[in-house]
Amino acid sequence: MKKYLFVIGLLFTGRSFGQVHSAGNVTSVKVKGPQLMLTMQHAVGEITVYSPTIVRVRLDQHSLGRDFSYAVVNGPVATHVDVNQTPEAITLLTDSLKVIIARKPFHVAFFTRDGRVINEDEQGLNTSWVNSFVTTYKHLQEGERFIGLGEKVGGLDKRGNGYTNWNSDNFGYRTDKDPLYATFPFYIGIHHGLRYGIFLDNSWQTDFNFGASTDRFSSFGAHGGEMNYYFIAGARIDDIITSYTGLTGRMKLPPLWSLGYQQNRYSYYPETEVMRIAQTLREKKIPADGITLDIHYMDKYKVFTWDKQRFPDPAAMSAKLADMGFKLTVIVDPGVKREEGYGVYERGKKEGAFIKYPDSTDYIGQVWPGWCAFPDFTGVKGRAWWEKEISKYASDGVSGIWNDMNEISTWGQKMPDNVLFNNEGEPATHLQMHNVYGLNMARSSFEGFKQALNRRPFILSRSGYAGLQRYSAIWTGDNRAEEDHMLLGVRLLCNLGLAGIPFTGMDVGGFTGGPSVGLYVRWMQIGSFNPYMRNHTGVNTKSSEPWSYGEQATEIVRNYISLRYRLLPYAYSNFYEATQNGLPLMRTLALDYTDDAAIYRSAFENQFMYGRAFMVAPFTGSEGFGNIYFPAGNWFDLYTDQVIKGGQELVSPLTMSKLPVYVKAGSIVPMQSLVQHTAEKPTDTLLLHVYAGDQGSDFVYYEDDGFSYNYEKGDFFRRRITYDPVLRQIILGKVEGQYASKFKFIKLALHGFGDGKLTVGGQAAGSEFEALLTPVSKFDPQGEANAPEGHTIRTVTVRNTSQEAILKY
């Protein structure tokens, strides 16, 4: 026993045992402003204060290399830091954090200013290397929960599980499959009323352990490169996401049409079939803005080409679709067929645009077109060539680019480790570059297509890395038409929202297989509350257009897509918020009810918020009753205005025609009249719903032209709307920006406010009552006609001027 303890002591005081190496004791410290430069017995490191709540830790066994990141685009901000040193430790103090770095051995711990432990290394393990693999071990706090990590399966709370980041093509993946398509190595820890985030910025294969097979530690590590992580503290999870996206960047406003319904399948061809789909959507009054073409539009799957038998005049077809209010999105894969005379390949080869073997020959792998070369998006040459090639789609009338197969995916799924990438002038192997390939493809597509269109492009990617939100939306790949996949999709989108990705979606209805009528309807209802709504099914499957499942299903689906369109002012304003603070439109309940244990239970973990107002309770299409949890506060039934007290769970009957949706008391929800596409103008009245509650709220309402970047020059319409139940008033703040709103009037719809006197600007307002909303379906599960009962809501209409207006009640 004594011998065993002696060996362990050697291991974790700086010596090695086998192939395990620890950093050892701190031997020297240099202080340079908010940064510590450390030398240890077997490692070197830097600890840098990035802000009062963000601290970066870098460690390696040898001198630190180039400080470069594909994810982080913003550096430290000026922060006052007090540094105190003793023989035992170095202490860093900001106005929010206390960081203690022990010297013997190296050990990092993060505290609140009043001394509560937020996060600390597991003493005795700390940071160590096994060969080139580096891992940091963190003490597993009592009752600690772990959420986030992006596109990861499992429950909301990931305690007891382990995960790997290695972007992978997973056709029809199992609901417990890991890894999937994208890497977002950022998670949030929760314990004892405290929250923190950890972002491991390392592009090699990374592994996270949240107490899997151990009750001692959580850990994160990489198969190569530095230990390079950011610790982010925050009073709320919102604060942590905002800080994280302050590092990795935030989305630009997408084109408004991309928030509308998108119709897709693998594949729509020829042109007559595309036009049939478009015409049927219009004839059946199913609002839609986009049609997407899968790989069969190309000539033998060759990128940047069209099959001229199927699509003889793409520009003319795009123009016809545009006249009907449709935008066209096309799939664009990275593989470029190795074929003499194929201009795209010849130009890429001439420009040296492809990834290569160490002997300078192009790597060739097999995918849809056959044997292909692959662009090197990590270098200036590869990006410049791609951006020029992709511009052709703009002249063809294409508005959106869908990047697929960009993990990189090849037949055999075994790209050689020794393939070399430019890596911004510092060549690196596939092992280091694999996880950032999709991010850089999305970047190149965004930058090239933005320049060619001279307006906002829509980019969709299957793969990515932290920072993807700067360029692209993401969807969750080739899912299955199964109930557990639908519910997993909800959790995946909420996880992606926690990773700073606001624009997310899944293949609504399922990509492989065929759903039942009940599952299809339920999925389309839930999809109407996804940030990106794309209906997509695979080849050799049943058609999945809204009219494919009978008249009853068509009516229900039409009503929910219509509701999505009426809510566009609400959704677009939330997307504007995301550009400012990184917060998602589709939100796990953990954002707002972090310490409520009930929301982590498997029965309730799929419930989510759509913005801050709506709570959606997803259920499968086969369930007759559902258990719904209502967090603290009061909740209005969207369809009946029935008020439900929070802090309880209720069993509710379920019908195919109605998705359980509730509105949080105190919420502000702008809506518009129904349109069939976003280029169609709504009526001139904005409908502003306000739900009475004990807690007030603010909502930043936002408009612009929906397609250009003029908003960056001040051409926008923005006003803060405030509900104050203490002062008993609703304030329409003064307008900011130079854009003229499309709405001349604002009609306030007051829910639960009673029949007291209303005044606007001191003048008495009318006491108008009317049936304002009806349930979104007029069929019961048996398909019998059922006249819905309208509910009365008090309303008052005011002119939409630029000045402040105060409604008192």
Image (cartoon, rainbow, N blue to C red):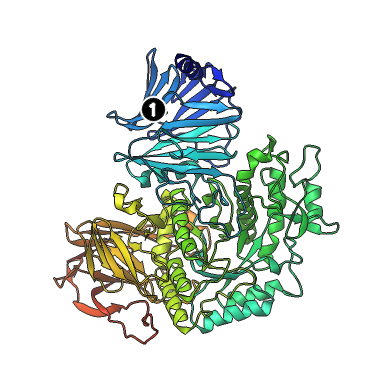
Specify whether residue 208 is in view.
Answer: yes
Circle 1 sits on which residue?
A: 109
Determine the secondary structure under disc 1. Answer: strand
* 588 on left or right of 131: left
Quarter of the view holding residue 747: bottom left
Residue sticking out furthest to the right: 340
Residue sticking out furthest to the top: 87
Name the one closer to the observer, 564 or 756: 564
Placement of 432 over or under 587, stated as above or below = above
Residue sticking out furthest to the front: 1
Q: Position of residue 524 (x, y in %)?
A: 46, 70
Q: Residue at x 49, y 40 (%)?
A: 208
Quadrant of the rendering where the N terminus is positioned: top left
* 382 on left or right of 61: right
Q: Residue at x 68, y 50 (%)?
A: 413
Q: Residue at x 28, y 66 (%)?
A: 651
